Image (tube, rainbow, N blue to C red):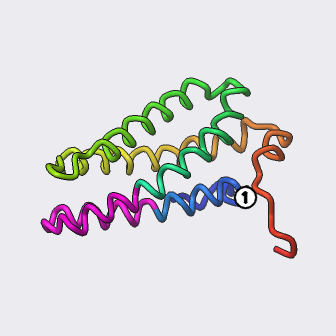
């Protein structure tokens, strides 16, 4: 994750970046479990990864990505990232639990790593430049009272 542009100071980006870190940790644990033939652990970690990914990508797509589509400059890139979401979710969610295709999961983990890297070092910094304050006002999570 980058620390150079200040985009994580935007509450939504900060939240998504923290989720990226957590997703990366789970994906790393899943990769290790598969490589060590701990398939029972791998199944549990795959469930955990999906439980993290689904709300995360929903937040990205309904918030930040929707605003970027509306603004227009990065719409093509947003569509590409959404297609990657679909591809990665399709692999993870489509694994046959009776006969898992662990090599496909490992390949999807690699794609997920590159996807997160692209969002963190490309899309997120670009979004703080491209989106007007009114867009950030619409997608900024509510802060708890006193927090």
Q: Exactly how many numbered labels are in the figure? A: 1
Query: Residue 135 colored magenta?
Result: no
Q: Considering only vertical position in the picture, is 130 above or below 92?
A: above
Rendering quarter of residue 76 = top right
Residue 124 lies, in percent from the top left, at 61, 46
Which residue occupies the extreme front position in the image?
98
Q: Considering only vertical position in the picture, is 79 above or below 127?
A: above
In the rendered image, which residue does mark 1 sit on?
11
Query: Residue at position x 48%, y 44% from top?
Result: 118
User: Is 41 on the left or on the right of 52, as rendered?
Assistant: left
User: Is 102 on the left or on the right of 129, as rendered?
Assistant: left
Query: Residue at position x 25%, y 49% from top?
Result: 105
Which residue occupies the extreme bottom position in the image?
146
Secondary structure type for disc 1: helix
Residue bounds of the magenta highlight = 23-49
Residue 107 lies, in percent from the top left, at 25, 45
Given residues 1 and 147, the one toward you in this image is 147
Mostly what secondary structure, the magenta segment?
helix
User: Is 2 on the left or on the right of 23, as rendered?
Assistant: right
Rendering quarter of residue 17 = bottom right
Query: Residue at position x 56%, y 63% from top?
Result: 18
Query: Residue 26 colored magenta?
Result: yes
Query: Residue at position x 75%, y 55% from top?
Result: 141
Residue 126 lies, in percent from the top left, at 64, 40
Q: Quadrant where the C terminus lies?
A: bottom right
Residue 145 lies, in percent from the top left, at 86, 71
User: Is 9 on the left or on the right of 51, as rendered?
Assistant: right
Categorize mark 1 by other alpha carbons within 10 Å: few (<14), some (14-19), many (20+).
some
């Amino acid at each position: 994750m980058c620390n150079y542009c200040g985009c994580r100071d935007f509450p939504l980006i900060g939240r998504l970046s923290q989720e990226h870190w957590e997703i990366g940790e789970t994906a790393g644990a899943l990769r290790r479990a598969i490589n060590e033939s701990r398939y029972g652990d791998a199944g549990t970690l795959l469930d955990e990864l999906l439980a993290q990914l689904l709300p995360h990508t929903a937040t990205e797509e309904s918030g930040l990505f929707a605003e970027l589509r509306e603004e227009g400059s990065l719409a093509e890139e947003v569509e590409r990232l959404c297609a990657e979401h679909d591809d990665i979710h399709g692999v993870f969610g489509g694994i046959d639990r009776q006969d898992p295709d662990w090599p496909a999961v490992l390949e999807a983990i690699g794609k997920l790593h590159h996807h997160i890297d692209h969002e963190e070092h490309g899309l997120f910094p670009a979004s703080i430049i491209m989106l007007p304050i009114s867009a950030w006002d619409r997608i900024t999570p509510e802060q708890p009272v006193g927090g």
